[in-house]
Image (cartoon, rainbow, N blue to C red):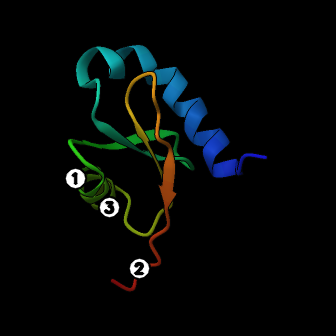
Amino acid sequence: MKSLLVVKGEEVYEKNKQKLERTHLGKIVAIEVESGDVAGIGANLDEAYEQALKKYPGKKFYFRKIGPCPAPTYLFWDGTH
């Protein structure tokens, strides 16, 4: 059973899929699920996370590789770092 974060993250990804795959294939996308926003895109998880954190401090993010092999994951930030 998938978590709600994964389900919502994939919904946002699907809405943005064509644009993301056309312009950022192979990169990592960070999705802020509450807003439904693509919060960051980077060459790796750290880059995507840093962008997302600047835009949405203290939020939960769903991360996924852009393209047909998603390698999905998620990350929680509790604001203490």
**Residue flagged by tag 2: what amino acid is it?**
Gly
- In the picture as drawn, the residue positioned furthest to the bottom comes out as 80
Q: Which residue is mark 1?
A: 47
Secondary structure beneath disc 1?
helix
- The x and y percentages for residue 72 are 50, 43
Q: Residue at x 39, y 86 (%)?
A: 80
Sequence-earlier tag: 3 or 2: 3
Please say if 29 is above or below 3.
above
Q: Which residue is mark 3?
A: 53
Taking depth in this image into account, of 64 and 41 the one nearest to the observer is 64
- The x and y percentages for residue 55 are 31, 55
State the CA–CA distance, disc 1 to disc 2: 18 Å
Judge the density around disc 2: few (<14), some (14-19), many (≥20) Cα neighbours within 10 Å. few
Judge the density around disc 1: few (<14), some (14-19), many (≥20) Cα neighbours within 10 Å. some
Q: Residue at x 32, y 40 (%)?
A: 28
Sequence-earlier tag: 1 or 2: 1
Give the number of callouts: 3
**Residue flagged by tag 1: what amino acid is it?**
Glu
Secondary structure beneath disc 3?
helix
State the CA–CA distance, disc 3 to disc 2: 10 Å
- The x and y percentages for residue 19 are 35, 17
Label disc, if present, on residue 79 of the rendered structure: 2
**Residue flagged by tag 3: what amino acid is it?**
Leu
